Image (tube, coloured by chain):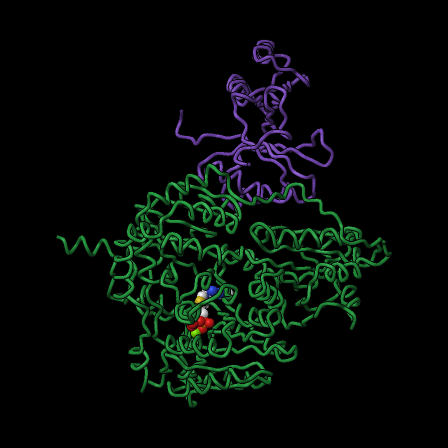
Amino acid sequence: MTERITGAKAIVKTLERLDVDTVFGLPGGAILTTYNELNDNTKFNHILVRHEQGAGHAASGYAIATGKVGVAMVTSGPAATNVVTALADANMDSVPIVVITGQVAASLIGTDAFQEADIVGITLPVTKHSFLVTKPEDVPRVLTEAFHIASTGRPGAVLVDITKSAMVGELDFEFPVEMELKGYNLKDHPDHQCLSAALELIKDSKKPVIYAGGGCVRANAELELMQFVKLLNCPVVTTLQARGVIPDSSTFALGMVGMHGTIAAAGSLQEADLIIALGTRFSDRVTGRLSEFAQHAKFIQADVDASEIGKNREIDAPLYGDVKQTLRFLNSELENRVDQHEQAKKLQPWWGFINELREKYPLYLDEECAQESAGQGLGNLSPQAVIKRIGEVAKEHDEDAVFVAGVGQHQMWASQFLGFEKPHNWVQSAGLGTMGYAIPAGMGAKAGRPSSDVWVVDGDGCFQMTNQELATCRLAGLPIKVMLINNGTLGMPRQWQSLLYNNHYSQTDLHDGADGWSGEIVRGDGVEKGTREAKPVPDFMKLAEAYDCLAIRVTRPEEVDEALERAAAEKERPVVVEFQVAKNAKVFPMVPAGESNDEIMYTQNLRPLSKRAAKEVAR
Amino acid sequence: MTSAAHKYTLSILVENKPSSLTRITGLFARRAFNIHSLAVGPTQIDDVSRVTIVTDETTAPVEQIVNQLRRLIYVLKVTVMDSNTSVNREIILVKVAADSSVVAERTAVLEVANLFRTKVVDVTPTSLTIEATGSATKLHGFIEALKPYNILEIVKSGTIAISRGPDTLEEAHSLGEA
Ligand SMILES: Cc1ncc(C[n+]2csc(CCOP(=O)(O)OP(=O)(O)O)c2C)c(N)n1
Ligand SMILES: [Mg+2]
């Protein structure tokens, strides 16, 4: 049965038929025709954001937390360009989102019409695919294709740019419609030959490590992964994206790998004879200096994106296909081949080496740094201790709590200390590293998972990029809990300035922390001395109250628990708890950018894996 | 062999959409792959175009370039053409100054044209325009032979390539795919 309707109505109907339950957006000229079709009978919930970037990140947070496609809808021109960052962010992290943008009428395209932007052209490099729809009859098919492309294979961001003329014009609506994607082929499982090669490598290995990435989360492969790990009695390192895909409480889990990963993770990769990379792309943040990465290892790499296999590193057994299917196959073969007892015996020395690293170099809270700050008018909470406690309290109240983070030091501490037990409960911007991601993404996660508590660990810098979405959260009934780790600075760049730029803190002080601002004006020709009593600008408590949030400021360690309990108990309003933490706290371990993973620093003065140091000692 | 990287000819079948070519060339630019030559045109199949690109491996292995191209949704097929089992052709138009009053020069240019079995497609009292088709090597030789004379203008197409024998790209079992 077909029905004669406008393109605008077809957009709404198609979204409904695709089982969309939430759309984040903000209207404007070129898309008003479509907004006119939203009413009380619309089957999805539209959440009115305050900035289009927020709509995009919200779609992404929704998608990561639910595993479904996140949807955003905005108008043309500046709205479309506002959403570019979110598209790039989602695409880089393989997050399935569809963004619908309004476009000027087809007859006006190319004339520099009011609010015209060539958004398909602008976003070509940062989307999985994009469509320009100029005919109303294409609406149902293109939207169906967009959802299919976003959610299958390696997921990603898809843009659908729809002209005003396609919204106004009419079509004979029919659903479902057949897709026309001749060039889009998906690969289920790898070829048998490659799988056999992988099994041989596994058999021969005495020092294997599983290097699990975001692809395992996107493929919902956590059960298969756990079985694989147990069959092989094999240690696992997880990337920033994959935290939780193997529970941190598991004895097999060595924690995060990479620039701020654990010593055990770095040490195991560098010493391994076999690295089994699953749904991960050998990012420079993981490999360190590529030429010195895991030099003794053979490599198995499983990925659903053929172009990731061997992109940065030559691979001995490439496994092109879905990670979940691949693991299923490997597991069924290994079940028959591996004698658990023999395997455990074979890996005993390897575990001995790893456990020694684990015991000698655990993650630490660095409370000394916090104590040093006391009496200097600086925040004196240990950020690591606060974040660890957030993780504990959150999980006591809701074992399925979702954690979200911004970008910076607080993100790394969150990844290190929250403690992840499940996938899909960790939402953050890894590949693009987008400051301001957390509040809108947390909002999206809460919209998708209303019964889970959503704890947003944010930085004072990040918070100032997107906090306007707290208004959206308040009005849309999305009570997220923002844990503002306020160190009064752009902490991550400041850390680099401390370690690499001789403590020259160029343009990283935000004057929004415990030490505040006393009115000094910094100009090119010098500093005009401040005269007033120091106060933070902005005052985050006033800001939070302005958004009708529960606002709590924590300045002393003994106040932490009570604040967290109050935050956990608040079910109606968003919460902002500001923790005034030590400005000089640093994220360790750390592999200095561009250096070998062997040079990982446990503290500023200790490089436990350094071959350089070892050589010097030997001499 | 010189130190120059080995060149590859890629044949790409792509859905004929307005953005198809931009997506392909954009990919080359973004991933820092070189394009030495590019040719695009319609095929025997409606709404399918064929793009022929000559590239090299200086920045990435050819498999990487092929895999990246396959990720593009509108790309239907990508094959690396093997020069031993395919026919590769370029076309070139060369305008040479050849004054009809200097008979010796005009004759000499025409001799070169003949030697390379090319065609003179335009004649004026002061110039000759020659059309030549052939492999890149042959055309290179042709230009070298014309160098002693006064070349006014050169226009060259991208390389196009087709496999020898009855198989077509459409049916070809393309490299690396199951
Ligand atoms: C949009 C954007 N601009 C700049 C950066 C570079 N950058 C990375 S972390 C960071 C500081 C973040 O400050 P804050 O939110 O206070 O976090 P902290 O590191 O202090 O925990 C900056 C400026 C970025 N990642 N994203
Ligand atoms: Mg900060």
Q: Position of residue A186 (x, y in %)?
A: 59, 45
**Quadrant where the image shows the C terminus of chain B:** top right
Q: Which chain is purple?
A: B
Rendered view: A558 above or below A485: below
Q: Quadrant of ligand 1?
A: bottom left
Seen at 34% across and 71% down, the residue is A586
Quadrant of the rendered image containing residue A589: bottom left
Identify the image quadrant of residue B146: top right
Foreground residue, A524 or A34?
A34
The answer to whether B76 is drawn above or below residue A443 in the figure is above
Q: Is residue A163 above or below residue A370?
A: above
Residue extending farthest to the bottom is A533
- Give the letter of the green chain: A
Viewer-closest of B24 and A336: A336
Q: Residue at x 34, y 75 (%)?
A: A584
Residue at image coords 60%, 27%: B160
Residue at 45% x, 79% y: name it: A393
**Residue found at the very far right of the displayed protein:** A4
